Amino acid sequence: MTSTRGATLFALALLAPALLYILTIVAYPLVDTFILSFTNASLKPDYDFVGWANYQRIFTAGNFTDVILRTFIWTFFSVSMKMVIGMTGAVLLNAAIPGQTVFRILTMPPWIVPMAIGIFMWGWMYNGQFGMISGLLQNFGLTKGPIAFLAYGNTAFWATVVTDVWIGVPMVTIYFLAAMQSIPKDLYEAAWTDGAGRFYRFRRITLPLMIPAIITMSLLSLIATFNSFDIIWILTQGGPSGSTTTMIIDTYKTAMGSRKYGEGAARAVVICIFVSLFCLAYFRAVRKLQQGEAK
Amino acid sequence: MSFHDSKVTLPAGANPLAASASSVAEISKAKVKTKARSAKAMIDRYKWFEVLALYAGIAVFLFFVLAPFIEGFLVSLKPLAQLFSTPYSFIPKTWSFDAYVNMWTSVPMLGMHIFNSFFISSVVTLIVVVIVVPAAYSFARFSFGGQGMLLGMFLAVNMFSGAVLLIPLFRLMRSMGLLNTYFAMIVPGAAFLIPSSIWLLRTYMLRIPRELDEAAWVDGASRLYTLRRVILPLAMPGIVVVAIMTFIGAYAQQFIFALTFNSKTEFMPLPIGLFAFFGKQEVVWNELMAASFVGILPVMIVIVVLQRYLVAGLTAGAVKQ
């Protein structure tokens, strides 16, 4: 189209509503979080700037470093399980066997239904006395007594990981499946003609060509899991005795439980910094990949 | 520099919308039909034990995915006394639909909660579509300085969850007088669905031939007229996908804002209305599960009816969790 100046104005006018909305509801609160993190804001209407006091407090007093470490372990296990199970699922659903379409639809529910409702169901499954997992384990004679998964730190930690994996797996699976189907078929046919077996074809064609999809999905899962709130809040509220308190839960408790807005904001800023670092790492990986392709 | 470029996110040539919309139904059909007819199809031939292993694998995979739903459904059909008895039995010994009757009295506002969930999601969808259509068109058709940066900025929104921004959002909602209203859940809910919808619709609009705009332009149509009469009709399938995805996203994510910004029972969406169940000493599990199923039934129907669009939308919208 001609008349670039008019076109630019028109383009900006079209963008204005979206831009304004995001600036008000996301960008402004983000800036406000940074500002609040240097204050002693609370429920009271006025507050003072306190410099780095909030940051000093969270890193010296209490167990913030434990919380960070726990969040990373929680995230690491969840994301890697999502990748492995998602890739397995994609391979299975990609196989040309009858029933394929139905199986694909059946993969979606955890992704589509309200997250909280899926988590309620897990809450019952983890019930020690009457829940399904403990019940079946006992029925098969694998454990002697009932296991109340959410009552002990160790099992509660893994229970929340598994639920997070469950919520994330459908997205990873469907996305990997789409990436897998976009790989040109002739590559496989050529390899097949040369006598390459199924496993060999997967390792030497599918996996290498899916690296961009794997990197993207890892980042998205990483961000989602790192920020995951609903699962832990519904199942354990961060307990028992803090064993499932991740950074998000910790921030929520500080801010909304104790109403320490200033200190809560400081904790939120630390989360933002970590998430930004993940994204930077992602961009570097993508750039490296593109350079590799250019050669 | 854009946050997710399609060249980056998927292997070359993988337009998510194009690749997946047709994939589920058509490719699989084609594969089955041409089986054994050519060398091409031979590659998809499995020995009997391979087929067995595949089905076994799929069974295990789907059991993991669906177990909570199966168990939840069976629980909703068990009488409470049987639920709290040992030893555990997966299949109900006696079937009972009592939970589906009693839940309406145990949760007096259940109908209201379901309505709220629908209402909130519908308004969110409306806001998102109205805002996203012009924005996506702008990104798809015009180029101006800083455009890539703007698109990147939009997608960066996905990095921050509502939980991180909760404190200032709470203060913002309070100063706008929106706390304890529908808008306290609608306004922030829509914000986090806008970026991925822009991305999804932009991808779709990029596939509409530019010549059409130019022809309209040559014929003397104004820019607004072109958008309204040329682009909108052509982009309608894409807009429908975006609307479905937004509705499902809004329906699925009703938790943290509703938990924090609203304390009035009559405005609570279903997940929060049922979450109140959890606080009680004795959770009436069969009724909780029954209520959950009534609440997710509409979404389940949507999945089955619109699965073609869904796969397209889900994979393209995978930019956003």
Image (cartoon, grey):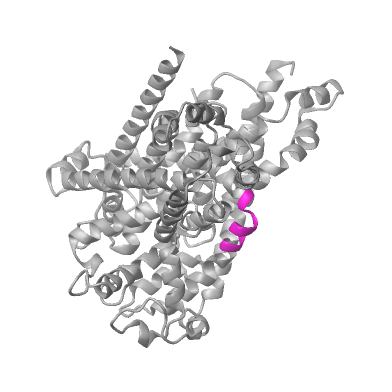
Query: Percent from the top left, x then y, of residue A257?
Result: 29, 59
* B209 relative to B310 in the view: left or right: right
Query: Percent from the top left, x then y, of residue A141?
Result: 22, 72
Q: Residue furthest top?
A: A295
Q: Is residue A226 visible?
A: no
Q: Is residue B304 found inside the magenta-colored segment of the image?
A: yes
- The answer to which image quadrant residue A265 occupies is top left
- The answer to which image quadrant residue B156 occupies is top left
Which secondary structure type mostly characterizes the magenta part of the structure?
A: helix
Q: Residue at x 61, y 29 (%)?
A: B139
Magenta stretch in the rendered image: B300-308
Above or below, B70 relative to B122: below
Q: Residue at x 34, y 52 (%)?
A: A45
Query: Percent from the top left, x then y, of residue A117?
Result: 44, 64
Q: Residue at x 50, y 25 (%)?
A: B149
Residue closer to the observer: A123 or B119: A123
